[in-house]
């Protein structure tokens, strides 16, 4: 995650600099970051039978890239707020996710055991 955030920040920051006397359009670079991160996120999603895993990881990769872009644009307050929000969300969702999906995993294990 750290490398995704740093990479997005670096691409965004460099898009704001003049290179060879001309400036690159930062929105074009941002669009390419979103496309590349979408590819990474898609690789994190796995399907196993009827189960789909990795959606939280894919979403986290996506939001970390967005936070890296925000830092690259110099909006540190937004980046700090978003970081806190994402961390609280991930920590709060974990116990809820375990409670909701623990029974389903146990049922699948029993079905597999008797098949």
Image (cartoon, rainbow, N blue to C red):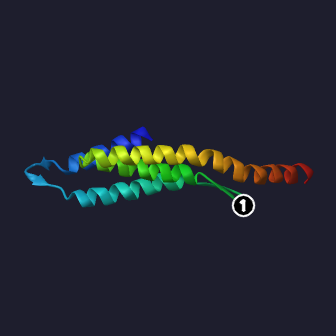
Q: Is residue 25 left or right of residue 71?
A: left
Judged from this view, the residue extending furthest toward the right is 114
Residue at 46% x, 47% y is 86
Where in the figure is residue 85, as x and y percent of width and height? 44, 48
Q: Secondary structure at mark 1?
A: loop
Q: Is residue 107 left or right of residue 57?
A: right
Between residues 103 and 77, which one lies in front from this camera angle?
77
Q: Quadrant of residue 7?
A: top left
Between residues 76 and 11, which one lies in front from this camera angle?
76
Where in the figure is residue 29, as x and y percent of width and height? 27, 56
In the picture, which quadrant includes the N terminus?
top left
Q: Residues within 10 Å of mark 1 (few under 14, many from 20)?
A: few
User: Which residue is identified by label 1?
Assistant: 50
Where in the figure is residue 67, as x and y percent of width and height? 36, 48
Q: Where 91 sits versus 100, above or below?
A: above
Judged from this view, the residue extending furthest toward the top is 2
**Residue 86 can be seen in this image:** yes
Residue at 13% x, 54% y is 23
Q: Is residue 108 left or right of residue 4?
A: right
Residue at 78% x, 51% y is 103
Q: Is residue 16 left or right of residue 70?
A: left
Residue at 23% x, 56% y is 26
């Amino acid at each position: 995650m750290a490398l995704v955030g740093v990479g997005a920040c670096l691409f965004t920051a460099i898009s704001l600099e003049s290179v060879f006397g001309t400036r690159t359009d930062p929105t074009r670079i941002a669009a390419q970051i979103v496309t590349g991160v979408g590819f990474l996120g898609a690789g994190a999603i796995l399907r196993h039978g009827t189960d789909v895993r990795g959606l939280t990881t894919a979403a986290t990769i996506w939001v970390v890239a967005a936070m890296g872009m925000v830092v690259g644009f110099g909006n540190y307050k937004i980046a700090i707020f978003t970081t806190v929000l994402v961390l609280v969300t991930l920590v709060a969702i974990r116990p809820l996710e375990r409670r909701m999906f623990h029974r389903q995993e146990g049922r699948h294990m029993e079905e597999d055991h008797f098949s």
